Image: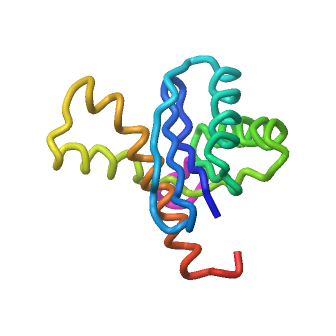
Amino acid sequence: MKILAIDYGDARTGVAVSDLTGSIVGYTTVIHSWNRKKTLDELVRLVKEQGAQRVIMGFPRNMDGSEGPRAELYRAFAADLEAALGMPVRLWDERRTTVEAHNILTETGYHGKKRKNTVDAVAASLILEGYLSYLRLHPEE
């Protein structure tokens, strides 16, 4: 089963898609847009084009597990995406994914504009990897 993960953002939205077996990240991209509708339309297109059967979206939580200040915005976007896709969008804890993405890019020598254009795709990959690990421990899902 292919799974598509989203690292939603105001200006850039990272996307990662698993391989056909749902075991590793197979594709990443970044949607560059400040326009919420354009981002929504592009995500719908990617879900269909990639043949994703499940969609997860990073959800902002504080380090203590409480909801972050942008939680309602993310919930509303996920609800709109669900309606557009006709399938559920699961919210997934994204704590520390952007920090980890920056660390990975630092270690691999990505800096400046190159880094700015890549960090969201890396964060989406980390969200997807976390979810795939969860599925290995909970195969009933």
The residue that appears at 55% across and 82% down in the rendered structure is 137
Left or right of 81 on screen, residue 7 = left
x, y percent for residue 12: 48, 28
Q: Quadrant of residue 21?
A: bottom right
Q: Which residues are magenta?
A: 60-66
Q: Quadrant of residue 110?
A: top left
Image position of 54 with respect to 137: above or below: above
The residue that appears at 63% across and 26% down in the rendered structure is 39
Image position of 125 with respect to 11: above or below: below
Image position of 37 with respect to 109: above or below: above
Quadrant in the picture for the C terminus? bottom right
Q: Please tell me which residue lies in front, 140 or 18.
A: 18
Left or right of 30 on screen, residue 88 = right
Q: Which colour style is shown?
A: rainbow
Could you tell me how many numbered marks the image carries? 0
Left or right of 57 on screen, residue 23 = left
Image position of 74 with respect to 16: above or below: above
Q: Quadrant of residue 90?
A: bottom right
The residue that appears at 78% across and 35% down in the rendered structure is 80
Q: Main secondary structure of the magenta part?
A: loop
The residue that appears at 40% across and 53% down in the rendered structure is 96
Left or right of 74 on screen, residue 19 = left
As for residue 61 lying within the magenta part, the answer is yes
x, y percent for residue 104: 25, 50
x, y percent for residue 114: 26, 28
As for residue 27 lying within the magenta part, the answer is no
Q: Please tell me which residue lies in front, 102 or 73.
A: 102
Quadrant in the picture for the N terminus? bottom right
